[in-house]
Amino acid sequence: MSKIVVKFGGSNLKSKNDLGKILNVIEQYKQQVIIVVSAFYGITDFLASRINQCLEERFDVNEIINDLRKKNEKIILENFEDIYLIRKTINQVDEVIVELEKFFLGIHYIKEIPEFLEDQILSSGEKISSIILHSLLESKGIRSELIFPEELPLITDGEFRNATVDFKASEKKVREKLSGSHTYVIPGFYGVSPSGKITLLGRGGSDYSAASIAKCVQADFLDIWKDVDGFMTGDPKLVENPVRLDKITYTEAAELAYFGAKILHPRTVEPLMEAHIPIRLFNINGILDNTQPVSYVNSEEVVMDGVVKSVTYSDEFCIIKLRGPGVGIKPGILAKVTGGLGKEKINISSVITSQIAINILLHNKDRSRALSVIKNIELPAVNEIITLDDISLIAVVGQGMLDNHGVAARIFSAIARQKINIKISSSGASQGVSYLVVDRENRTLAVREIHNEFFSN
Ligand code: ASP
Ligand code: MG
Protein backbone atom coordinates (compact mmCIF):
# COMPACT_ATOMS: atom_id res chain seq x y z
CA MET A 1 0.00 0.00 0.00
CA SER A 2 1.37 3.40 -0.88
CA LYS A 3 2.33 5.66 1.98
CA ILE A 4 3.45 9.21 2.49
CA VAL A 5 5.64 10.26 5.39
CA VAL A 6 4.56 13.69 6.58
CA LYS A 7 6.76 15.75 8.87
CA PHE A 8 5.76 18.75 10.96
CA GLY A 9 8.54 20.81 12.52
CA GLY A 10 8.81 23.08 15.51
CA SER A 11 7.87 26.04 13.32
CA ASN A 12 4.48 24.38 12.77
CA LEU A 13 4.10 23.94 16.52
CA LYS A 14 4.49 27.47 17.72
CA SER A 15 1.25 29.28 18.29
CA LYS A 16 -2.27 28.67 19.44
CA ASN A 17 -3.85 27.71 16.14
CA ASP A 18 -1.01 25.57 14.88
CA LEU A 19 -2.37 22.17 15.93
CA GLY A 20 -5.60 23.09 14.17
CA LYS A 21 -3.69 23.86 10.97
CA ILE A 22 -1.86 20.54 11.21
CA LEU A 23 -5.15 18.74 11.64
CA ASN A 24 -6.48 20.45 8.53
CA VAL A 25 -3.48 19.30 6.55
CA ILE A 26 -3.76 15.71 7.73
CA GLU A 27 -7.45 15.58 6.90
CA GLN A 28 -6.67 16.55 3.30
CA TYR A 29 -4.48 13.54 2.58
CA LYS A 30 -6.20 10.85 0.57
CA GLN A 31 -3.38 8.34 1.04
CA GLN A 32 -2.16 6.73 4.22
CA VAL A 33 0.17 8.98 6.18
CA ILE A 34 2.92 8.33 8.68
CA ILE A 35 3.37 11.49 10.70
CA VAL A 36 6.71 12.46 12.21
CA VAL A 37 6.73 15.43 14.59
CA SER A 38 9.28 17.71 16.19
CA ALA A 39 8.92 19.08 19.67
CA PHE A 40 6.84 22.19 20.27
CA TYR A 41 8.78 25.29 19.31
CA GLY A 42 11.63 26.07 21.71
CA ILE A 43 11.16 23.01 23.92
CA THR A 44 14.43 21.29 23.03
CA ASP A 45 16.31 24.52 23.81
CA PHE A 46 14.33 24.82 27.04
CA LEU A 47 15.34 21.32 28.13
CA ALA A 48 18.98 21.92 27.16
CA SER A 49 19.14 25.12 29.17
CA ARG A 50 17.56 23.43 32.20
CA ILE A 51 20.19 20.69 32.07
CA ASN A 52 22.83 23.40 32.38
CA GLN A 53 20.97 24.98 35.27
CA CYS A 54 20.94 21.69 37.13
CA LEU A 55 24.65 21.31 36.58
CA GLU A 56 25.34 24.78 37.83
CA GLU A 57 23.88 25.64 41.20
CA ARG A 58 20.94 27.60 39.79
CA PHE A 59 18.65 24.75 40.31
CA ASP A 60 15.01 24.35 41.13
CA VAL A 61 13.62 21.15 39.80
CA ASN A 62 10.11 22.02 40.92
CA GLU A 63 10.18 25.16 38.88
CA ILE A 64 11.36 23.30 35.78
CA ILE A 65 8.71 20.63 36.14
CA ASN A 66 5.90 23.06 36.92
CA ASP A 67 6.92 25.12 33.95
CA LEU A 68 6.72 22.10 31.67
CA ARG A 69 3.39 21.00 33.11
CA LYS A 70 1.93 24.47 32.63
CA LYS A 71 3.16 24.82 29.05
CA ASN A 72 1.68 21.48 28.03
CA GLU A 73 -1.59 21.82 29.91
CA LYS A 74 -2.14 25.14 28.21
CA ILE A 75 -1.70 23.55 24.80
CA ILE A 76 -4.00 20.67 25.69
CA LEU A 77 -6.71 22.92 27.09
CA GLU A 78 -6.57 25.14 24.03
CA ASN A 79 -7.03 22.26 21.63
CA PHE A 80 -9.29 19.71 23.29
CA GLU A 81 -12.94 19.92 24.29
CA ASP A 82 -13.70 16.50 25.69
CA ILE A 83 -12.92 16.49 29.42
CA TYR A 84 -12.14 12.77 29.40
CA LEU A 85 -9.59 13.22 26.62
CA ILE A 86 -8.10 16.25 28.30
CA ARG A 87 -7.46 14.21 31.43
CA LYS A 88 -6.16 11.22 29.53
CA THR A 89 -3.75 13.33 27.49
CA ILE A 90 -2.51 15.29 30.50
CA ASN A 91 -1.83 12.01 32.30
CA GLN A 92 0.00 10.55 29.35
CA VAL A 93 2.19 13.64 29.03
CA ASP A 94 2.75 13.54 32.76
CA GLU A 95 4.36 10.13 32.53
CA VAL A 96 7.11 11.74 30.43
CA ILE A 97 7.36 14.71 32.79
CA VAL A 98 7.62 12.51 35.89
CA GLU A 99 10.47 10.66 34.26
CA LEU A 100 12.14 13.99 33.44
CA GLU A 101 11.84 15.03 37.06
CA LYS A 102 13.86 12.00 38.14
CA PHE A 103 16.51 12.68 35.51
CA PHE A 104 16.89 16.32 36.52
CA LEU A 105 17.20 15.40 40.18
CA GLY A 106 19.75 12.75 39.28
CA ILE A 107 22.02 15.09 37.37
CA HIS A 108 21.74 17.69 40.07
CA TYR A 109 22.96 15.26 42.71
CA ILE A 110 25.79 13.75 40.71
CA LYS A 111 26.66 17.13 39.14
CA GLU A 112 27.36 15.50 35.86
CA ILE A 113 25.33 14.55 32.84
CA PRO A 114 26.07 11.19 31.31
CA GLU A 115 25.77 11.29 27.52
CA PHE A 116 22.95 8.79 27.40
CA LEU A 117 20.90 10.81 29.85
CA GLU A 118 21.32 14.04 27.94
CA ASP A 119 19.94 12.36 24.85
CA GLN A 120 17.10 10.87 26.79
CA ILE A 121 16.13 14.21 28.33
CA LEU A 122 16.32 16.11 25.05
CA SER A 123 14.19 13.52 23.26
CA SER A 124 11.28 14.22 25.64
CA GLY A 125 10.02 17.22 23.69
CA GLU A 126 9.18 15.03 20.72
CA LYS A 127 7.56 12.41 22.92
CA ILE A 128 5.25 15.02 24.38
CA SER A 129 4.26 16.63 21.07
CA SER A 130 3.55 13.24 19.51
CA ILE A 131 1.36 12.20 22.45
CA ILE A 132 -0.65 15.40 22.12
CA LEU A 133 -0.99 15.20 18.35
CA HIS A 134 -2.02 11.56 18.53
CA SER A 135 -4.75 12.34 21.08
CA LEU A 136 -5.96 15.20 18.95
CA LEU A 137 -6.31 12.95 15.91
CA GLU A 138 -8.28 10.48 17.98
CA SER A 139 -10.53 13.25 19.23
CA LYS A 140 -11.37 14.04 15.62
CA GLY A 141 -12.10 10.42 14.81
CA ILE A 142 -8.92 9.80 12.80
CA ARG A 143 -7.80 6.29 13.66
CA SER A 144 -4.14 6.54 14.50
CA GLU A 145 -1.43 4.77 16.41
CA LEU A 146 1.34 6.38 18.43
CA ILE A 147 4.66 4.59 18.10
CA PHE A 148 7.96 5.64 19.64
CA PRO A 149 11.22 5.08 17.69
CA GLU A 150 12.31 2.56 20.35
CA GLU A 151 9.28 0.45 19.47
CA LEU A 152 9.97 0.39 15.74
CA PRO A 153 12.91 0.11 16.45
CA LEU A 154 14.80 2.72 14.49
CA ILE A 155 18.33 1.51 15.15
CA THR A 156 21.32 3.86 14.99
CA ASP A 157 25.08 3.51 15.19
CA GLY A 158 24.82 4.44 18.86
CA GLU A 159 26.62 7.78 18.71
CA PHE A 160 25.03 10.09 21.25
CA ARG A 161 23.85 13.55 20.12
CA ASN A 162 24.61 12.87 16.50
CA ALA A 163 23.70 9.34 15.52
CA THR A 164 23.37 7.83 12.08
CA VAL A 165 20.52 5.48 11.23
CA ASP A 166 21.55 1.89 10.58
CA PHE A 167 19.29 0.85 7.73
CA LYS A 168 20.46 -2.72 7.61
CA ALA A 169 19.36 -3.17 11.20
CA SER A 170 16.19 -1.05 10.94
CA GLU A 171 14.61 -1.33 7.54
CA LYS A 172 12.77 -4.62 7.69
CA LYS A 173 11.47 -4.25 11.23
CA VAL A 174 10.31 -0.67 10.72
CA ARG A 175 8.49 -1.63 7.55
CA GLU A 176 6.72 -4.50 9.29
CA LYS A 177 5.84 -2.40 12.30
CA LEU A 178 4.30 0.28 10.08
CA SER A 179 2.50 -2.08 7.73
CA GLY A 180 -1.01 -1.25 8.93
CA SER A 181 -3.28 0.92 6.84
CA HIS A 182 -4.10 3.51 9.51
CA THR A 183 -2.30 6.73 10.40
CA TYR A 184 0.82 6.54 12.54
CA VAL A 185 2.29 9.26 14.73
CA ILE A 186 6.00 9.01 15.55
CA PRO A 187 8.24 11.42 17.47
CA GLY A 188 11.20 12.59 15.40
CA PHE A 189 14.75 13.51 16.44
CA TYR A 190 15.96 10.18 17.79
CA GLY A 191 16.52 6.50 17.32
CA VAL A 192 18.00 3.86 19.58
CA SER A 193 21.45 2.32 19.81
CA PRO A 194 21.88 -1.42 19.24
CA SER A 195 21.67 -1.80 23.03
CA GLY A 196 18.44 0.20 23.19
CA LYS A 197 19.70 3.58 24.41
CA ILE A 198 18.10 6.71 23.00
CA THR A 199 20.44 8.48 20.59
CA LEU A 200 19.63 11.87 19.07
CA LEU A 201 20.02 12.38 15.35
CA GLY A 202 21.59 15.83 15.70
CA ARG A 203 19.88 19.16 16.37
CA GLY A 204 17.06 19.72 13.94
CA GLY A 205 17.19 15.99 13.26
CA SER A 206 13.48 15.31 12.87
CA ASP A 207 13.81 15.86 9.13
CA TYR A 208 16.40 13.13 9.07
CA SER A 209 14.16 10.83 11.19
CA ALA A 210 11.32 11.36 8.79
CA ALA A 211 13.55 10.71 5.77
CA SER A 212 14.87 7.54 7.38
CA ILE A 213 11.38 6.25 8.08
CA ALA A 214 10.35 7.16 4.53
CA LYS A 215 13.18 5.02 3.22
CA CYS A 216 12.32 2.11 5.52
CA VAL A 217 8.67 2.01 4.42
CA GLN A 218 9.50 2.89 0.80
CA ALA A 219 7.19 5.87 0.92
CA ASP A 220 5.99 7.59 -2.23
CA PHE A 221 7.00 10.98 -0.85
CA LEU A 222 8.47 12.70 2.13
CA ASP A 223 6.31 15.75 2.75
CA ILE A 224 7.85 18.39 4.96
CA TRP A 225 5.57 21.14 6.20
CA LYS A 226 7.16 24.48 7.05
CA ASP A 227 5.97 27.97 7.81
CA VAL A 228 7.97 29.52 4.97
CA ASP A 229 8.12 29.23 1.20
CA GLY A 230 10.58 26.37 0.71
CA PHE A 231 13.90 26.86 -1.06
CA MET A 232 14.60 30.33 -2.39
CA THR A 233 17.32 31.94 -4.49
CA GLY A 234 18.42 33.78 -1.34
CA ASP A 235 17.48 34.52 2.24
CA PRO A 236 14.45 36.86 2.13
CA LYS A 237 15.78 38.65 5.21
CA LEU A 238 18.92 39.60 3.32
CA VAL A 239 18.40 39.87 -0.40
CA GLU A 240 16.02 41.80 -2.60
CA ASN A 241 13.26 39.93 -4.39
CA PRO A 242 14.34 36.34 -3.87
CA VAL A 243 12.52 33.84 -6.00
CA ARG A 244 11.15 30.52 -4.86
CA LEU A 245 12.78 27.42 -6.33
CA ASP A 246 10.09 25.02 -7.52
CA LYS A 247 12.51 22.24 -8.24
CA ILE A 248 15.96 21.42 -7.01
CA THR A 249 18.07 18.29 -6.92
CA TYR A 250 18.95 16.25 -3.85
CA THR A 251 22.55 17.40 -4.14
CA GLU A 252 21.64 21.06 -4.38
CA ALA A 253 19.33 20.75 -1.39
CA ALA A 254 22.03 18.97 0.58
CA GLU A 255 24.67 21.60 -0.27
CA LEU A 256 22.33 24.44 0.65
CA ALA A 257 21.47 22.79 3.96
CA TYR A 258 25.09 21.95 4.68
CA PHE A 259 26.17 25.53 4.09
CA GLY A 260 23.56 27.25 6.16
CA ALA A 261 20.08 27.24 4.61
CA LYS A 262 17.75 26.43 7.47
CA ILE A 263 15.08 24.82 5.33
CA LEU A 264 16.18 21.22 5.78
CA HIS A 265 18.46 19.30 8.07
CA PRO A 266 21.63 18.63 6.03
CA ARG A 267 21.25 14.87 6.31
CA THR A 268 17.67 14.68 5.10
CA VAL A 269 18.43 13.75 1.51
CA GLU A 270 20.90 10.98 2.43
CA PRO A 271 18.38 8.17 2.92
CA LEU A 272 16.19 9.32 0.05
CA MET A 273 18.57 9.68 -2.89
CA GLU A 274 19.19 6.04 -3.55
CA ALA A 275 15.57 5.13 -2.97
CA HIS A 276 14.48 7.99 -5.27
CA ILE A 277 11.90 9.24 -2.83
CA PRO A 278 11.12 12.89 -3.61
CA ILE A 279 10.84 15.51 -0.91
CA ARG A 280 7.92 17.89 -1.21
CA LEU A 281 8.08 21.07 0.83
CA PHE A 282 4.85 22.81 1.76
CA ASN A 283 4.11 26.11 3.44
CA ILE A 284 1.42 25.66 6.06
CA ASN A 285 0.65 29.37 5.88
CA GLY A 286 0.30 29.35 2.12
CA ILE A 287 -2.50 27.78 0.17
CA LEU A 288 -3.32 24.65 2.11
CA ASP A 289 -3.13 22.33 -0.83
CA ASN A 290 -1.09 19.20 -0.48
CA THR A 291 -1.00 18.58 -4.19
CA GLN A 292 0.95 21.81 -4.69
CA PRO A 293 4.34 21.80 -2.96
CA VAL A 294 6.32 25.04 -2.82
CA SER A 295 9.58 23.21 -3.57
CA TYR A 296 10.13 19.77 -4.97
CA VAL A 297 13.41 17.92 -4.40
CA ASN A 298 14.45 14.89 -6.44
CA SER A 299 17.22 13.77 -8.75
CA GLU A 300 15.92 15.49 -11.85
CA GLU A 301 18.33 18.20 -12.93
CA VAL A 302 16.92 21.49 -13.93
CA VAL A 303 19.65 23.79 -15.15
CA MET A 304 18.73 27.42 -14.77
CA ASP A 305 19.86 30.25 -16.95
CA GLY A 306 23.15 31.27 -15.40
CA VAL A 307 23.40 27.91 -13.66
CA VAL A 308 23.30 29.33 -10.13
CA LYS A 309 20.16 28.45 -8.21
CA SER A 310 20.75 29.88 -4.79
CA VAL A 311 23.16 31.76 -2.61
CA THR A 312 23.26 30.98 1.06
CA TYR A 313 25.50 31.82 3.98
CA SER A 314 26.41 30.74 7.45
CA ASP A 315 27.96 32.56 10.38
CA GLU A 316 28.53 29.32 12.23
CA PHE A 317 31.96 28.45 10.89
CA CYS A 318 35.52 29.33 11.79
CA ILE A 319 38.87 28.46 10.27
CA ILE A 320 41.93 27.04 11.96
CA LYS A 321 45.01 27.84 9.96
CA LEU A 322 48.25 25.86 10.33
CA ARG A 323 51.15 27.81 8.90
CA GLY A 324 54.67 26.75 8.14
CA PRO A 325 56.96 26.65 5.13
CA GLY A 326 55.99 23.68 3.04
CA VAL A 327 53.14 22.32 5.18
CA GLY A 328 51.16 21.85 2.01
CA ILE A 329 53.66 19.48 0.49
CA LYS A 330 54.97 17.60 3.51
CA PRO A 331 53.20 14.26 3.72
CA GLY A 332 51.44 13.13 6.86
CA ILE A 333 50.49 16.45 8.48
CA LEU A 334 46.93 16.45 7.33
CA ALA A 335 46.49 12.82 8.29
CA LYS A 336 47.67 13.51 11.84
CA VAL A 337 45.37 16.50 12.20
CA THR A 338 42.26 14.90 10.72
CA GLY A 339 42.96 11.69 12.62
CA GLY A 340 43.19 13.59 15.91
CA LEU A 341 40.01 15.55 15.25
CA GLY A 342 38.22 12.43 14.10
CA LYS A 343 39.04 10.67 17.34
CA GLU A 344 37.36 13.50 19.21
CA LYS A 345 34.36 13.26 16.88
CA ILE A 346 34.99 16.77 15.61
CA ASN A 347 33.60 17.17 12.15
CA ILE A 348 35.74 18.96 9.57
CA SER A 349 33.57 20.77 7.07
CA SER A 350 36.31 21.45 4.56
CA VAL A 351 40.08 21.54 4.18
CA ILE A 352 41.93 23.86 1.82
CA THR A 353 45.67 23.66 1.58
CA SER A 354 48.36 25.71 -0.05
CA GLN A 355 52.13 25.42 0.01
CA ILE A 356 52.42 27.29 3.28
CA ALA A 357 49.08 26.82 5.02
CA ILE A 358 46.44 24.26 5.81
CA ASN A 359 43.02 25.76 6.41
CA ILE A 360 40.52 23.72 8.32
CA LEU A 361 36.93 24.85 8.22
CA LEU A 362 34.79 23.78 11.14
CA HIS A 363 31.82 24.71 13.23
CA ASN A 364 32.29 27.42 15.85
CA LYS A 365 30.96 25.09 18.49
CA ASP A 366 33.94 22.79 17.98
CA ARG A 367 36.52 25.56 17.83
CA SER A 368 38.11 25.36 21.25
CA ARG A 369 38.10 21.57 21.43
CA ALA A 370 39.66 21.38 17.97
CA LEU A 371 42.34 23.90 18.89
CA SER A 372 43.39 22.00 21.95
CA VAL A 373 43.46 18.72 20.02
CA ILE A 374 45.64 20.23 17.29
CA LYS A 375 47.97 21.94 19.76
CA ASN A 376 48.61 18.58 21.37
CA ILE A 377 49.69 16.94 18.14
CA GLU A 378 53.36 16.96 17.36
CA LEU A 379 53.66 18.92 14.11
CA PRO A 380 57.26 19.99 13.57
CA ALA A 381 56.55 21.58 10.19
CA VAL A 382 53.94 23.92 11.62
CA ASN A 383 55.22 27.06 13.22
CA GLU A 384 52.02 28.97 13.74
CA ILE A 385 48.41 28.05 14.49
CA ILE A 386 45.87 30.83 14.16
CA THR A 387 42.10 30.97 13.99
CA LEU A 388 39.96 33.10 11.76
CA ASP A 389 36.85 34.09 13.68
CA ASP A 390 34.05 36.50 12.85
CA ILE A 391 33.90 35.15 9.36
CA SER A 392 30.98 34.11 7.17
CA LEU A 393 30.85 31.37 4.68
CA ILE A 394 28.95 32.11 1.50
CA ALA A 395 27.92 29.21 -0.68
CA VAL A 396 26.73 29.53 -4.25
CA VAL A 397 24.84 26.45 -5.31
CA GLY A 398 23.70 25.13 -8.68
CA GLN A 399 24.15 21.84 -10.46
CA GLY A 400 26.67 22.04 -13.27
CA MET A 401 28.71 24.96 -11.93
CA LEU A 402 31.99 23.24 -12.62
CA ASP A 403 31.26 22.91 -16.32
CA ASN A 404 30.51 26.58 -16.59
CA HIS A 405 33.65 28.55 -15.99
CA GLY A 406 31.96 31.88 -16.43
CA VAL A 407 30.04 31.31 -13.22
CA ALA A 408 33.05 31.61 -10.92
CA ALA A 409 34.16 34.74 -12.74
CA ARG A 410 30.77 36.33 -12.17
CA ILE A 411 30.84 35.48 -8.46
CA PHE A 412 34.28 36.99 -8.03
CA SER A 413 33.59 40.12 -9.99
CA ALA A 414 30.40 40.71 -8.02
CA ILE A 415 32.44 40.61 -4.81
CA ALA A 416 35.21 42.71 -6.31
CA ARG A 417 32.71 45.41 -7.28
CA GLN A 418 32.09 45.95 -3.58
CA LYS A 419 35.82 45.86 -2.84
CA ILE A 420 35.33 42.97 -0.48
CA ASN A 421 38.30 40.83 0.32
CA ILE A 422 37.81 37.09 -0.07
CA LYS A 423 39.74 35.25 2.60
CA ILE A 424 39.43 31.78 1.11
CA SER A 425 37.47 30.25 -1.69
CA SER A 426 36.90 26.81 -3.04
CA SER A 427 35.02 25.05 -5.74
CA GLY A 428 35.17 21.62 -7.18
CA ALA A 429 34.47 19.62 -4.04
CA SER A 430 31.18 18.77 -5.66
CA GLN A 431 29.55 19.57 -8.98
CA GLY A 432 27.11 21.91 -7.37
CA VAL A 433 28.79 24.37 -5.06
CA SER A 434 31.37 27.12 -4.85
CA TYR A 435 32.00 28.79 -1.57
CA LEU A 436 33.93 31.68 -0.25
CA VAL A 437 34.81 33.04 3.13
CA VAL A 438 34.61 36.75 3.94
CA ASP A 439 34.77 38.83 7.09
CA ARG A 440 31.44 38.76 8.88
CA GLU A 441 31.04 42.54 8.49
CA ASN A 442 31.04 42.09 4.71
CA ARG A 443 28.69 39.14 4.60
CA THR A 444 25.40 40.91 3.92
CA LEU A 445 26.81 43.07 1.18
CA ALA A 446 28.57 40.11 -0.43
CA VAL A 447 25.47 37.91 -0.39
CA ARG A 448 23.34 40.73 -1.81
CA GLU A 449 25.80 41.48 -4.57
CA ILE A 450 26.08 37.85 -5.65
CA HIS A 451 22.31 37.49 -5.55
CA ASN A 452 21.95 40.64 -7.64
CA GLU A 453 24.50 39.38 -10.12
CA PHE A 454 22.53 36.25 -10.86
CA PHE A 455 18.93 37.12 -10.11
CA SER A 456 18.38 40.83 -10.53
CA ASN A 457 16.09 40.22 -13.47
N1 ASP B 1 13.47 19.36 18.45
C1 ASP B 1 14.74 19.05 17.90
C2 ASP B 1 15.60 20.30 17.82
O1 ASP B 1 15.15 21.35 18.16
C3 ASP B 1 14.65 18.35 16.58
C4 ASP B 1 13.94 19.08 15.48
O2 ASP B 1 13.26 20.07 15.72
O3 ASP B 1 14.03 18.63 14.34
O4 ASP B 1 16.73 20.21 17.47
MG1 MG C 1 13.72 21.65 11.84
Image: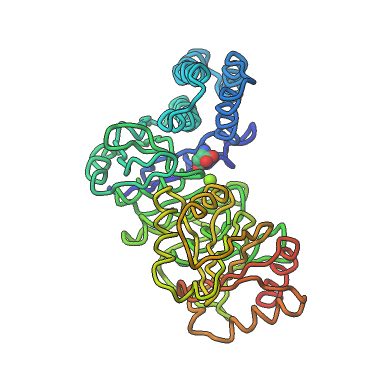
Whether residue 140 is visible, yes or no, is no
- Residue 220 lies, with reference to residue 132, above or below; the image says below
Q: Nearer the viewer, residue 63 or 22?
A: 63
What scheme was used to colour the molecule? rainbow
**Percent of width and height locating residue 127:** 45, 29
Q: Quadrant of the C terminus?
A: bottom right
The residue at the point 57 percent across, 68 percent down is: 323
- Residue at position x 65%, y 82% in the image: 410
Where is residue 357, by image quadrant?
bottom right
Q: Nearer the viewer, residue 226 or 81?
A: 226
In the image, 40: left or right of 150? right
**Percent x, y for residue 179?**
26, 40
Q: Position of residue 223 (x, y in %)?
A: 45, 50
Question: In the rendered view, would you say 169 is above or below 339?
Answer: above
Residue at image x 51%, y 72%?
353
Q: Residue at x 49, y 25 (%)?
A: 112
Residue located farthest toward the front when viewing the structure as drawn: 380
Horizontal side of residue 409 vs 85, given as left or right? right
